[in-house]
Each structure stands twice: as C-alpha cells, then as structure tokens.
Image: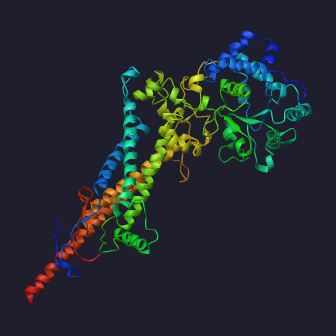
C-alpha cells in the first residue's frame, strides 16, 4: 500500500476527459442510480479523492456475452472509465497480457490490493470431475475463483451464469455448473442477472460500489434493487393493452401488428425482474418486447428449465408426459368428476335395490301376517 | 322435525325422538358461504387471468376489461383472506365443532379406525353409516387437507404474486414476499398457484356430491345444517 493509488478522476483526466465531461458523467450516474441532484457533488468528490477500487474480472463457463454487453455501455464515459480501470488489473478476455504474464498480473493484483479489490465473476465453475470442465491457466476455474475470492472485498456475479447457472446448469447439468453464491459462501455477493445484463446496469452497479464504497441495496435474492425491484411488466409500454384486455393471439395476427400485449404469447415480462423496459438496450434503442417478441425471462433463476419460452406455466414432467399445471388439473378434475358420477349412479342403484328389498320384506311380512 | 322428549335413556330406540344438536355457530356458517362465494369468484376470474378473453380493438384507454377481471380476483382474494383469519379466530373462541378444521385428533385410535369405516361406507362395504354431530373423521381429514391447507396455500402463493405488483417495501411484500426468497422464479409460484386451484376444484366436486349424497343416504342432516346450524337425525338408533 506504499504507492499512492490514483483516483477515478486521475484516470479520467489521463484519458483526456475534461472536468466538464466528468461532471456530466457524475450527474448522469446519479440519475441512473435513482439518486437526487444532491448526490452529484458527492459522486464527484468520491471519484476525485478516493483511491480507485481495483476490479479483478474472472471468466468461468460463459459465452462472453456479459463482456460484450459491458463494452457497449451507452454512456461512453462510463465505458472508458470503468473499463480502463478494470483492464488495468485483470480480465483475461480484455487485457493485453496473456499466458504466464496474465496469471502473474492476477497474483500481483491480489497481493497488492488484499482485501480491497472487487471480484467480478462472469460465468460459473463446473464442479463435476473436480472442476476439469473449465481450465484456466492449467488449473480448474473453481480453484482460481476460490483463490481470487479469498481476499476480495465483495463479489459481483455477472449475468445469469454466475447468478443462477444459466444454460450450462440447465437440466440435467452434466458438468454440475454451479452459481457463484453456492461455491463462495463467506463473501458479500451481488447478483446482476441477465443473459447478458444491460450494459448501463453493469456500469451503474460498479460505479455505485466504487463511489460509495459499499454494496447497493439488494433484494431477497441478492440483486440490486435500483435495477431489479420491478418487473419488466410493471414498466412495459404495452401495459395499457394488458389492462384493456387487448392481446396478441398469433404471431401474425392483426393484434400483433397493432402492438398489443404479448401476455398470451407467453411473454415472461410479468415474472421477470429487470430494467429492460426502462433502460432498454443499445443506447436505449429497443428491447425484446418493443421488437415484437415476448420477454424470455433471461434474468430469472433457472430460465432454461421453465418449459417453453411461449408458455405461461411450467412444464411438469413428473407424470412421464409433458404437461402443465392446468392440463394436469383438468385431467384430475375430470377423473374425480367421472368417479363421482359413477359413485352417484351406484349409490342410486343400491338405494333403489334396498328400497325394493324393504318393500318386498314388508309385503312378505304382511302376507305372513294375513296368512297367520 | 326434532321434537323434545322427556324420556330418559335407555329406552327402546324406536320410542325416542332425539333432539337436534346445534353444531355450526353463525360465524362458521357465514364463513362457509362467504368462502364458497369467494372461491367460485376466484376460480372464474383466475381462469380468465390465465386465459384472457380478448376485447375489441380501439384505443386501450377505452377498455379496462382485464383490469376489472384482475380487480375482482384481488378483491375476492382479500375477502377470502379476511374470512379465513376470522375463521381461525373462531376456532379459538367458538364451540368444539369450530376447531375441527384446524385440529385433527391424530392421537385417537378410534378416529383412525372410523376413517376406515367411512371409507368402507363409500365403497359400499358398510350397510349402515355411523352418526356424527360434527364432521365424520374422513370428512374432517379431507377438510383439513383441502380447505385448511389448500386455502393457506392459495393465500400464501396468491399474496406473494400480488406483492410483486404492489412492489418492494409494500405491506403485502413484507408479509408474503418472503416466498420469492425461496421460490426464485415467480413463474414457479404461478404454477403452484394453478395447481392449488385444481386441488380446491377437486375438493369442490367431491364436497358438493358427498354433502348431497349424505343428506339423502346418511342418518343425519347435512345441507340444511350449514344453513340453520342444527344437525337433525333421521333415526334414534344408537351410533
């Protein structure tokens, strides 16, 4: 800790960013994080005086879509600032160094900033066969993850992979791909799910943590509330059609052309927590529902194992056939209804039989009486 | 039909008319019918929420059809919840029949034996049913499994779903949002809520059938008891 660590502001100035642009960045960040204008000078001060927090970015089983999303952050400053800070330390996809050099850089950063760095994890470790399904620098990724996590201040789980497992953890999960929070149990973990997460959400979370030196407020599942407290459905611009009862019923019908609600097409907006309908994608250009396709719920736990992307309910396979709750319920109610009808018929027959028997008995005793 | 008698037991069975027994107190009966109405409303609106009917075209602000369906569903759910809370309270302060839905006498060997007696009765293997003031043991078990647990299930899953719209920090979220901490994907909660609905549909079919059947074939009144509160008996033979 002997050498002075430069501040964010230093890094920005070094990159040729003016004070004016820096202040713009601060106010935009405050707005993105849902903070009032009073926080703008606080952000500016924090970024101008605090030594920057180094970030180590490791990659397990993943497709790099998180990184791809991240480097496309709509706000160029956010990208420049955060990205330059990260690539300075360790990110095996983006850094210039390779091979032994890269691994040395990782060890260097861990050693130098013990207990101070943030560990960002993209992808997850497979645990089967001692983690042999994902090898980084000659060793299983799970070992690198544990080593890097040991001295981390906090961990960010980027994307659906690190947060929940995503496609490599989909049933039957042959490599036993396991989300980060089930491997690292003793560190604060913040989940930023999505496949990938929205770029502005990613830079926003990092900026918040670097600026305020703490985790943002999290929900019950460990996701930052400022981006994941509402469902896509809650802020969807097609919501009025939902309340009105105007739904698309086929992909090529008139209602689809009119941009009605995609609820009946299995849009997962009502069950998905994310900021797509407010922040949108690619510099706020669009998001899946706006382009006419329902949400597939990529930022939800186990989204590959929920049956089809076009259903409202799960597929339940316990009965040996593919069915959903309503089909099972209909069959069960049908069986019970039929049994009840049959039971009623038998009851009526039995009763009629008993009555005629009783009648016969009475008649018999009558005739016996008269006979005697 | 019941007439008072001064004859002390034991007397020849045929010479005695048994008095009626007051079984279901007014709050229990009120709950039964409010609950029945709420459940039917919830089923119909719930079906339409899962499979929405489509209204005409035109400006969205001219319609609030699906909104009304959901509003009705939520209102009925709130009535059902409050009624259930009231019913639980009455189980504490009411007569011992009011406790039957909440406490099963699992420790009584006779109760278990009579469950099988009842099963044999429904399989046409018993020629004569037993007499009960309250629920027979099989009915009590079914009520507990389907209505007590089923309603609780629907209240918890339903409010957890409602909490999603009410939002983080709202009181539905405070009381029921914890479910989403355990069941992460809310589509799973939707699925569980649908399964719970069918669980109660199955109960309804059986319940209505058996109530009418017992009214005709058993030795006591059933349907009228839930209206008047009095159980009357068709014969005075011993149990």
B47 above or below B228? above
Residue A142's x, y, as percent?
79, 43
Q: Residue at x 37, y 39 (%)?
A: B75
Q: Name the outermost residue toward the left.
A: A370
Left or right: A183, with A5 as reference point: left
Quadrant that contains the N terminus of chain A: top right
A183 above or below A204? below
Residue A228's x, y, as percent?
60, 32
Left or right: B44, with B167 as reference point: left
Residue B184's x, y, as percent?
59, 42
> What colour scheme does the image use?
rainbow
Can residue A327 be seen in the rendering of this structure? no
User: In the figure, residue B88 lies in which quadrant?
Assistant: bottom left
Tell how many labels. 0
A331 above or below A344? above
Quadrant that contains the C terminus of chain A: bottom left
User: In the figure, residue B73 lies in which quadrant?
Assistant: top left
User: In the figure, residue A287 lies in which quadrant?
Assistant: top right
Of residue B155 and residue B124, the one placed in the foreground of this image is: B155
Q: Residue at x 16, y 70 (%)?
A: B4
Of residue A211 and residue A171, the one placed in the foreground of this image is: A211
Residue A45's x, y, as percent?
73, 19
Left or right: B108, with A292 as reference point: left
Q: Residue at x 55, y 53 (%)?
A: A318
Can residue A308 be seen in the rendering of this structure? yes
């Amino acid at each position: 800790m002997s050498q002075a660590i430069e501040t964010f502001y230093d890094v920005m100035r070094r990159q040729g960013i003016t004070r004016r642009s820096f202040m713009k960045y601060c106010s935009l960040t405050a707005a993105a994080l849902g903070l009032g204008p009073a926080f703008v000078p606080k952000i500016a001060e924090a970024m101008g005086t605090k030594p920057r927090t180094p970030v180590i970015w490791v990659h397990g089983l993943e497709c790099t879509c998180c990184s791809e999303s991240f480097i496309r952050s709509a706000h160029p400053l956010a990208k420049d600032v955060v990205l330059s800070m990260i690539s300075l330390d360790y990110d095996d996809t983006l850094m210039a160094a390779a091979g032994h050099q890269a691994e040395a850089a990782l060890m260097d950063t861990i050693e130098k900033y013990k207990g101070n760095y943030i560990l960002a994890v993209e992808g997850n470790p497979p645990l089967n066969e001692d983690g042999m399904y994902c090898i980084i620098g000659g060793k299983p990724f799970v070992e690198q993850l544990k080593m890097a996590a040991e001295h981390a201040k906090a961990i960010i789980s980027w994307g659906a992979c690190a947060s929940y497992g995503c496609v490599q953890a989909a049933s039957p999960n042959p490599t036993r791909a396991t989300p980060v929070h089930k491997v690292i149990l003793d560190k604060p973990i913040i989940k930023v799910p999505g496949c990938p997460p929205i770029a502005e959400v990613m830079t926003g979370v990092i900026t918040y943590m670097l600026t305020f030196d703490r985790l943002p407020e999290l929900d019950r599942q460990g996701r930052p509330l400022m981006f994941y407290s509402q469902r896509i459905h809650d802020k969807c611009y097609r919501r009025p059609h939902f309340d009105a009862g105007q739904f698309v019923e086929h992909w090529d019908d008139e209602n689809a052309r009119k941009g009605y609600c995609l609820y009946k097409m299995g849009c997962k907006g009502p069950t998905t927590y994310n900021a797509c309908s407010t922040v949108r994608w690619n510099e706020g250009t669009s998001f899946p529902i706006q382009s006419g396709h329902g949400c597939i719920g990529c930022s939800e736990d186990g989204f590959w194992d929920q049956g089809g992307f076009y259903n409202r309910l799960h597929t339940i396979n316990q009965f040996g056939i593919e069915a959903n709750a309503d089909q099972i319920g209909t069959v069960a109610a049908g069986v019970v209804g039929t049994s009840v009808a049959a039971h009623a018929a038998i009851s009526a027959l039995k009763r009629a039989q008993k009555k005629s028997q009783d009648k016969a008995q009475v008649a018999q005793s009558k005739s016996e009486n008269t006979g005697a | 039909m019941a007439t008072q008698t001064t004859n002390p037991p034991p007397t020849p069975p045929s010479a005695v008319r048994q008095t009626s027994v007051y079984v279901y107190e007014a709050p229990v009966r009120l709950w039964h019918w409010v609950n029945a109405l709420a459940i039917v409303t919830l089923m119909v609106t719930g079906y339409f929420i899962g499979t929405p009917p489509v209204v005409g075209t035109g400006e969205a602000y001219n319609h609030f059809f699906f909104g009304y369906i959901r509003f009705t569903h939520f209102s009925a759910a709130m009535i059902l919840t409050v009624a259930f809370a009231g019913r639980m309270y009455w189980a504490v302060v009411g007569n011992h029949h009011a406790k039957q839905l909440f406490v099963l006498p699992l420790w009584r060997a006779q109760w278990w034996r009579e469950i099988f007696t009842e099963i044999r009765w429904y399989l046409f293997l018993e020629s004569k049913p037993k007499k009960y003031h309250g629920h027979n043991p099989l009915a009590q078990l079914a009520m507990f499994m389907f209505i007590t647990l089923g309603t609780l299930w629907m209240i918890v899953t339903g409010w957890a779903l409602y909490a999603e719209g009410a939002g983080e920090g709202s009181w539905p979220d405070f009381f029921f949002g914890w479910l989403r901490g355990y069941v992460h994907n809310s589509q799973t909660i939707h699925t569980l809520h649908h399964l719970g609905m069918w669980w109660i549909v199955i109960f309804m079919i059986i319940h209505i059938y058996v109530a009418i059947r017992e009214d005709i074939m058993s030795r006591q009144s059933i349907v009228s008891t839930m209206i008047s509160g009095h159980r009357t008996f068709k014969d005075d033979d011993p149990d």
